[in-house]
Amino acid sequence: MFHVLTDQFGSAVTLTDRAALAHWNDLQMSFLAHGATAPDHLAKTLEADPDFALGHAVKGIFLLLLGRRELVPTARDSLTRARETASGDMREAAFAAALDDWLAGNPAGAAERIEATMGLQSQDPLAMKCAHAIRFILGDRREMLDQLDRVLEAYDPNHSGYGYFLGCRAFALEENGRYEEARAAGIEALAHAPDDAWGLHAVAHVYDMTGDSPGGLHWLDKNERAWSHCNNFRYHVWWHKALMHLDQGEIDAVLDLYDTKVRSDHTDDYRDIANATSLLMRLELEGTDIGDRWAELADLAERRTGDGCLIFADLHYLLALVGDNRKAAARRLIARIVRDGKNATTDFSRRFDAPGTAAAEGLEAFGEGAYGRAFERLVAARTTMQRAGGSHAQRDVFERITIDAGIRAGRLRQAGALLDARAALRGGAEDSFSENRREMIADLGRNRVRMSAE
């Protein structure tokens, strides 16, 4: 084992070339800020030092975070290179073992291995962000916060990664319902790292979850420099803006943002598709004619029915197929989810089983107008929907569909109870969706009473 150089965060690395170290430092900063330049910096690092084992392991992890089946073989190649170039360094070995765990279907184990390296060096923003990202896609909101709290005392405001650490902690606090703490942490994150898009976005989540869309729009508008540099994560921030306009009933603004920002590039990245499909479904639930916008998403989703990387991705592909009435493709996707769920031996296959199977069957039934069955299956999925990953705001589209299925099926009391549970998750806040559905339930209830009296 040999350590020649130290990166900007104080971590010893086995790089021997100072140009490679400069690219490695740039890679870490870009990754922390969701910058568009991260892949280029990583490529330049490995070009300058092809025997950098940690770089190969990190490349493999980055590829798996993209949730694309065709990238798995390349991630395996990265693991092979990480092992071939191993120097005996414990941190490098831990990242390589984490990549191996994930490829074996155990991303939770991968996160644990990376988190263990933070026991060796608490101030390791790269490890912190990688573990945070894995916990996020698994829906492990408690562990996402716990792993940050374990190293909280190690960070001080003078550390160059402090702002990004606070941004991750702000998001973890928000997902655990500690909204005011999250808001404060996110604001402080931007004060230390003005390009911390994740911290900015954590505060946007607070505005969403507390029903303050005007405040959220103001927050995003005044801090645009924190996310204008981003990779496709900027589409997700535009998605947040669109949700806020939707909450205020500004449908024209939502459609304009969809066409010019959220879906300006017709990528097949599952995160971009999730933004688009969930926004279109929310619009349709409000009675908006969205024209032919489902078609290009459904075309992409049809090509992803066999992916099986993430249930979060699959459920959003299914929204596109249901939205565009692609029944045969939807059934192929559901059959694969059911099949994968029956082999519940890995972290991912257990999620295909629950919530995947029930949620998928519920979405299909909703698209077919079988609202009673849709409600039953979607309610069955609710208790484990956290495991689908993503955020409360992202999964809320499924909660909205469930509530609307209940109302359309005449399950008014149960739908009302779900609205109560949704408000409780939001600290008692009621948004326009909740207010509108309570009015619908009240109107339908009065009609029932009137009809029974006639």
Image (cartoon, rainbow, N blue to C red):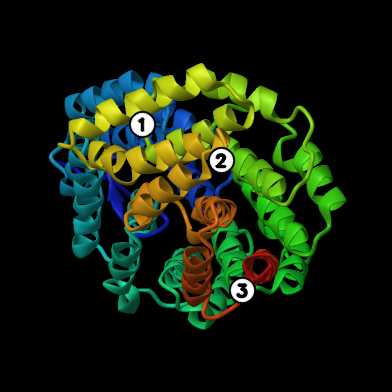
Q: Amino acid at mark 2?
A: Ala
Label 2 sits on a secondary structure element that is: helix
Circle 1 Cα neighbour tier, 10 Å, few/some/many (<14 / 14–19 / ≥20): many
Q: Mark 1 and mark 2 in contact (Cβ < 8 Å)? A: no
Q: Which mark is residue 309?
A: 1
Residue 196 location, quadrant: bottom right
Label 3 sits on a secondary structure element that is: helix
Q: In this view of the protein, which residue sits in the foreground, 291 or 133?
A: 291
Q: Amino acid at mark 3?
A: Ala
Label 1 sits on a secondary structure element that is: loop
Q: Which mark is residue 27?
A: none
Q: Nearer the viewer, mark 2 or mark 3?
A: 2
Q: Amino acid at mark 1?
A: Cys
Question: At x 37% / y 36%, what residue is drawn?
Answer: 310
Residue 342 location, quadrant: top left
Q: Mark 1 and mark 3 in contact (Cβ < 8 Å)? A: no
Q: Nearer the viewer, mark 3 or mark 1?
A: 1
Alpha carbon separation for disc pair 3 and 1 = 36 Å
Question: At x 19% / y 38%, what residue is drawn?
Answer: 346
Alpha carbon separation for disc pair 2 and 1 = 14 Å
Alpha carbon separation for disc pair 2 and 3 = 30 Å
Mark 3 highlights which residue?
191
Q: Is residue 41 visible?
A: no
Q: Residue at the far front: name it.
A: 454
Question: Horizontal and vertical percent for residue 73?
Answer: 31, 19
Question: At x 79% / y 39%, what residue is drawn?
Answer: 289
Residue 344 against residue 392 in the figure, above or below:
above
Question: At x 67% / y 23%, what residue is drawn?
Answer: 296
Image quarter in which the N terminus is found: top left
Question: Horizontal and vertical percent for residue 319?
Answer: 55, 36
Question: Horizontal and vertical percent for residue 422?
Answer: 50, 69
Mark 2 highlights which residue?
274
